[in-house]
Image (spheres, grey):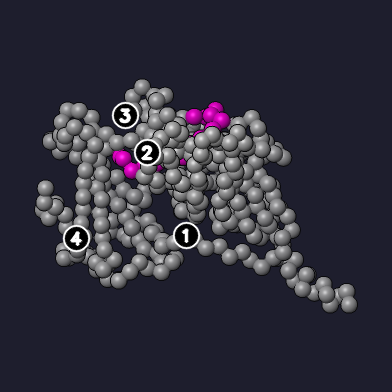
Amino acid sequence: GPRAPWQSAARGDGSQWSPAALSFTTESSWRGDAPNSEDNDRGWNVTFRIPFETLGIANAPSPQTQWRLGVVVHDRDDAAGTLVPDQVWPETMDAEQPGSWGQLVFGLPAYTPPSAVTQGVTTIRDGLNGAAVRDGMVGGSSNCGASVDDWWLEWGEASYPSHEFFNVQNQHDVADWPCFSKYYVTFPLDSVPPDKVILAATLQLHQFGNAGAGWDPGPTPSYLQVLTVAEDWGATLTWNNAPLAQQNVGGAWVDPFTEPVPREGADRQWNVSAAVAQAYAAGQPLRLAVYSADADYHSGRYFRSSKFGDAAERPTLFVRWGDPGAKAFRALLPYTTR
């Protein structure tokens, strides 16, 4: 129906919000038989489109521009108006305090390493030199949650602690949320020598397959994003208790395999230099989540986990480091040897 009676805009001046004539559009839809029926609907969504001109600029801001963004979802599940607590993003967001809102940054974070000469590369993988790399998958795995009997009550609590593989998958159809699947991993950084500078770091995952084999048309390349996580997770990792992502730090295109799938699979890599440098400086392990914003039904990508028997195919972190003093020594060397 007409949207005007159901949407409004306001502008804040630091102390109060005042109605404002701002141009934007909304669309809402659902997946199910009909609104307000007795049958379970598989999902609702609303899309906001806010032109840059509405916000006072002609085009997208330049890279690294930071805006603030907060979201509040008001939900009422029955005609009686039973109180349902608002859901907010970020978790500590206060609508009246913009400083508590999330950070919307245009472009990926850039990392310029300090001046130093490479002195070593540390390889971190579960079981290598005693390293323990914790990882886990949450969501629907590779079979859209077929392992649970009740999607509504059990899907969000599904856990895969012993799986030798994981799937990264998303898609545009909100009704297919049981197929969503993402990956969490924690790399210890204590094997990197202390008091060094991080020059570069690479996350490597071994892909052995993908969804969509036999589909027509077949799967297309997927952009898998790597995000930092600020906190650890408990003994059992699930979709419902998994920590929220802190920052999107990078991404890489991952091609699907054509038939037949190569027996040896393929190593895929992501630049995580900024994330490793930040975690190393804070004396923390590197905590990451891998997800995508793909639209296709068959966007899933299958990788080996840290539980896989062949250690060479387990998730691996390569960290190249150096000593800030090495550059100065190198510059003096020609003079001391003449």
- SS at circle 2: loop
The location of residue 66, given as percent across then percent down, is 40, 64
Residue to which mark 3 is pinned: 152
What amino acid is at disc 1?
Leu
What amino acid is at disc 2?
Tyr
Q: CA distance from mark 2 to mark 4?
A: 35 Å
Q: Is residue 317 left or right of residue 153?
A: right
Q: Is residue 38 magenta?
A: no
The residue drawn where x is 22% and y is 39% is: 30
Which contiguous range is marked in magenta?
Answer: 160-174
For marks 4 and 3, the one nearer the N-term is 4
> How many C-alpha atoms fall within 10 Å of the one at disc 3: few (<14), some, or many (≥20)?
few
Quarter of the rendering containing residue 79: top left
Asked whether residue 297 is in view, the answer is yes
State the residue in front, 22 or 16.
Answer: 22
Quadrant holding the C terminus: bottom right
For marks 3 and 2, the one nearer the N-term is 3
Residue to which mark 2 is pinned: 297
Q: Are marks 4 and 3 in contact (CB under 8 Å)?
A: no
Residue to which mark 1 is pinned: 108
For marks 2 and 1, the one nearer the N-term is 1
For marks 1 and 3, the one nearer the N-term is 1
Q: CA distance from mark 4 to mark 3?
A: 34 Å
Q: CA distance from mark 1 to mark 3?
A: 35 Å
